[in-house]
Amino acid sequence: MADTLHTPTDDLRDTMLAMGTRARTASAALAKAGRDGRTRAIQAMAEALSAAETEILAANAEDLEGGKAKGLSDAMMDRLALTPARVQSIANALRAVAELPDPVGSEIARWTVPSGLDIARVRTPLGVIGIIYEARPNVTADAAALCFRSGNAAILRAGSESLNSAIAIANALRTGLASAGLPEDAVQLVQTKDRAAVGHMLTGLNGNIDVIVPRGGKGLVARVQDEARVPVIGHLEGLCHTYVDGAAASQMAIDIVVNAKMRRTGICGSTETLLIDQAVAETLLPAIAAALADAGCALKGDDAARSIVPDMDVATEADWRTEYLAPIISVRVVDGVEGAIAHITEYGTSHTECIITENAATADRFINEIDAGIVIHNASTQYADGGEFGMGAEIGIATGRIHARGPVGAEQLTIFKYVVRGSGQTRP
């Protein structure tokens, strides 16, 4: 793979603009490749990535050493780390994307109007997608494959912590594309740590980037949303809640809460606040708190929660607004589902919210009134993941209200056009 950035003396602006031009050209070739050609290319990318395991792990070891030197948190180090199993899992995720239906060209709807015109709404690629992300190396492969599955070219900008890993992964992906006879420039990685590169991407590179997808911490996403001159698909924070209702099954509640918080604390689908109905708090909260503590979780509670479990730390106003990404959970006792909805409405970030209850009417009220990309009934918030949704992989979770919401997979990376078929009609 030729370096995406040619020499250290190149002007960064000109280099970034050239990347945009090459990506636009590559996107046209992807459209001509057809769904079978795109499928073969993704399969080739997976094989090339799997074959490059040794190089990828060596690059990742450099990133891990750099992360330790920078004092990255345990959660960030977990996001950054690759193992042989994780590398093969990334390759398998690509294979799963290759098996997904190709959304390009599929009809969303079709109808005939009184004039006799046949009108169809048909999915088309967005074009060129810029993805800006931080410490997770797997995003390089996931993002590239999903963009490719939906007929889009990708310009990727990894965080400095994961840059060596991202370069090694991108090298493999481009090798796969070349072996499949498709342009390597359909996947380009910005190979500089200069933060000015992000600023150039946010301008749209002279109209060559159609959409920006940020995937990372609050600071990154806030900057992208504030400065981007092109549409943005993304979420600012994953401040997820699990509400244990008065009609919850006790053991189910314990199991789900512990998993939702502790399976992986550093992901955006991890529960950060536990809400529990005052009707069962006295009897159920001690068991949930004990299970969380046994799993290594620290608890911060409001006055009502601490009156039941006194060894909790005090939860402050800031805790209700904190995405810990760590083994810490805030706990509030609420007045039934109405209290839970009120709390989530005030503090939620429209990512993922969960209710645990055996009462169908209560579940329906929660589902209907909660404004979030994902609403879950009787299952862990850790299922907030495109792979678990059958999408093969995802670029991220969108919390906006335009175009895409929830897990962003291949279908969400398309737009549509109207195809109108006539038989000689002229408009009077």
Image (cartoon, helix red, strand yellow):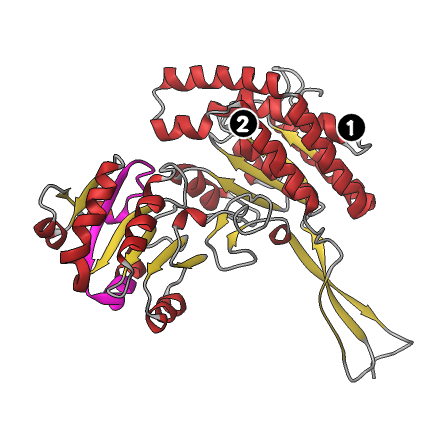
Is 414 placed above or below 149 here? below
The x and y percentages for residue 10 are 64, 19
Q: Write down the region rendered in magenta.
A: 320-342
Instruction: Say which residue appears at 73% left-offset and 25% top-offset.
Output: 175
Q: Is residue 323 magenta?
A: yes
The x and y percentages for residue 226 are 45, 45
Per the image, the residue denoted by label 1 is 178
Determine whether the residue tagged by mark 1 lies in a helix, strand or loop.
helix
Q: Is residue 348 magenta?
A: no
Instruction: Say which residue appears at 56% left-offset and 31% top-offset.
Output: 157
Q: Residues within 10 Å of mark 1 (few under 14, many from 20)?
A: some
Mark linked to residue 85: 2
> How far is mark 1 from mark 2, CA to CA?
26 Å
Q: Is residue 303 left or right of residue 48?
A: left
Residue 66 seen from this side: yes
Front one among 174 and 231 = 174
Q: Is residue 404 left or right of residue 52?
A: left
Residue 208 seen from this side: no
Instruction: Say which residue appears at 31% left-offset and 45% top-offset.
Output: 258
Is 101 placed above or below 23 here? below
Q: How many marks?
A: 2
